Image (spheres, rainbow, N blue to C red):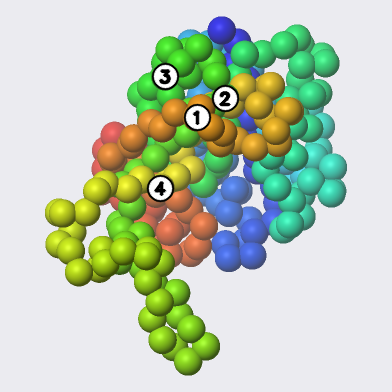
Amino acid sequence: MRILALIPARAGSKRLPNKNKLMLGNKPLVAWSIDCAKGLEFICDILVSTDDPEIATIGKQYGAMVPWLRPAELATDESHVVDTLIHATDWYEANYGKVDGILLLQPTSPFRTKETIRAALHLFRQAGARESVVSLSIVKTHPEWCFYLGNEGEMKPLSAGKGFTKRGQDLEKVYGINGLVYVITPSQLLGTKMIIGDNSKGLVVESGCETLDIDTPYDFDLAQFYLAKNDDF
């Protein structure tokens, strides 16, 4: 099984400027994902897709493939990650041959572990490499406890039921995408332009620190705090 690890790391970020280049501990944020993918079975290459020359330099320094700078139209606030993945996959397969899967590692999840990636790849292989594997976590607020707000501030239940009258332990567990790991078949990616399909498999990740997604200054401060208190990284 040949798996291409893809790390999309564009320059722009409104809520946390230059986040992919920020130093977390002793290395830039994007380097955490590169290092996590190194040495894993089935990974044929690690490719960083970026429009930023500085991130490209960092990627190469940490051993990733950075063959080009991403086209500007794929690096705007409105750009979709699927288009970035398709662009990179088309190029890689044209130059290095077909792959069985794309491992999407977003650089904003620095504390993902090799064990989680291995579990995702194992599930992908076990499922016969059909469609995708997506990492999930139990949601903090159950959908049956969520509401829309009307124009006058009136609360309208998201669910048609009366879940908000139940105790939390009586509600069925519900999972949300945590952004840690995705493994997608090229056929699904290129054919449907979607990461999640009818036959996608969910990989549950329970570790709270591992699922930290850095998107704001507060998230980054939290990551630094965790790093200072943890000797494992």
Placement of 220 over or under 177, stated as above or below: below
Q: Are marks 1 and 2 in contact (CB under 8 Å)?
A: yes
Q: Position of residue 139 (x, y in %)?
A: 33, 52
Secondary structure under badge 1?
A: loop
N-terminal label among 1 and 2: 2
**Residue occupying image coordinates x 70% and y 47%:** 80
Residue 15 appearing in the image = yes
The single residue placed furthest to the front in the displayed view is: 160
Residue 229: percent from the left, percent from the top? Answer: 25, 48
Q: CA distance from mark 3 to mark 4?
A: 18 Å
Q: Amino acid at mark 3?
A: Leu
Q: Give the residue type at disc 4.
A: Gly
Kindly report the distance in space between the C-alpha atoms of the residues bearing marks 1 and 2: 6 Å
Label 2 sits on a secondary structure element that is loop
Mark 2 / mark 4, whichever is N-terminal: 2
- Sort mark 1 into few (<14), some (14-19) or many (20+) by Cα contacts within 10 Å: some
Per the rendering, the mark at residue 200 is 1
N-term mark: 3 or 2:
3
